[in-house]
Image (tube, grey):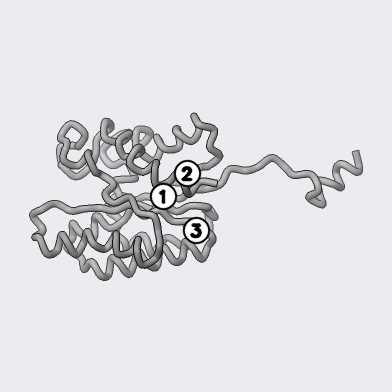
Amino acid sequence: MYSLVLALILGLIPLAATAESIVVLGDSLSAGYGIDVKQGWVNLLQQKFNQQHIDYVISNESISGDTSAGGLARIDQALARHKPAIVILELGANDGLRGLTPQVMKSNLTEMIQRSRKAGAKVLLLGMKIPPNYGKRYIEMFYNVYPQLAAELNVPLVPFLLEDVALNAELMQADGLHPNELGQPQIVEKVWPYLQPLLK
């Protein structure tokens, strides 16, 4: 018995593996705005992990209404608390809806990616689009931030998180901005092919 205890103390016998952490840093699209949070895509992704015996625990650090600046202000605390292996960044939509400068958004996202990597995490970036009434030039400047970041920082990118969802009224809430419960599984399937290669 003594030798077993000593071996455990010295780390000669491995303890049970603990699940790795994934942090989702996002806004209302990831916080489950307007729906039961249990039906949100982040929780559905955790269910997918559990069903497939994939040993990751997701911490959802998403706040409705948050901007890239808000995410930058709180990412250090999230990284310190969860020590994630992967960070999923879903921010920027509210920057666009408020007409904020895309270059500032790009700078904020860049800093979050760099801080996440410095903390030892892989990063998955989720791209967004904004409604057409914001004008062609602004829309293009906004949307182009995501592929530019993906290319410059070599970070995997989901080109548009709400692809095949945003224009389908059956999958969207009445506000036309947030997916309903029916749209959430579609988001999981959109994220999965880009996330899977990052898993250990």
Q: Which residue is mark 1?
A: 24
Could you tell me which quadrant the N terminus lies in?
A: top right
Q: Is residue 189 above or below residue 159?
A: above
Q: Is residue 191 above or below residue 84?
A: above
Spatial CA distance of label 3 from label 1 is 11 Å
Give the SS element for disc 3.
helix
**Residue at 85% across / 43% down in the picture?**
5
Q: Amino acid at mark 3?
A: Leu
Residue 141 in percent (x, y) is at 19, 64
Residue 55 in percent (x, y) is at 56, 39
Q: Which disc is residue 58 wearing?
A: 2
Spatial CA distance of label 1 from label 2 is 7 Å
Mark 1, Cα crowd under 10 Å, few <14 / some 14-19 / many 20+, is many
Spatial CA distance of label 2 from label 3 is 13 Å
**Residue at 35% across / 61% down in the picture?**
150
Mark 1 near mark 2, Cβ–Cβ under 8 Å?
yes
Q: Amino acid at mark 2?
A: Ile
Q: Earlier in the sequence, mark 3 or mark 1?
A: 1
**Residue at 28% across / 42% down in the picture?**
33
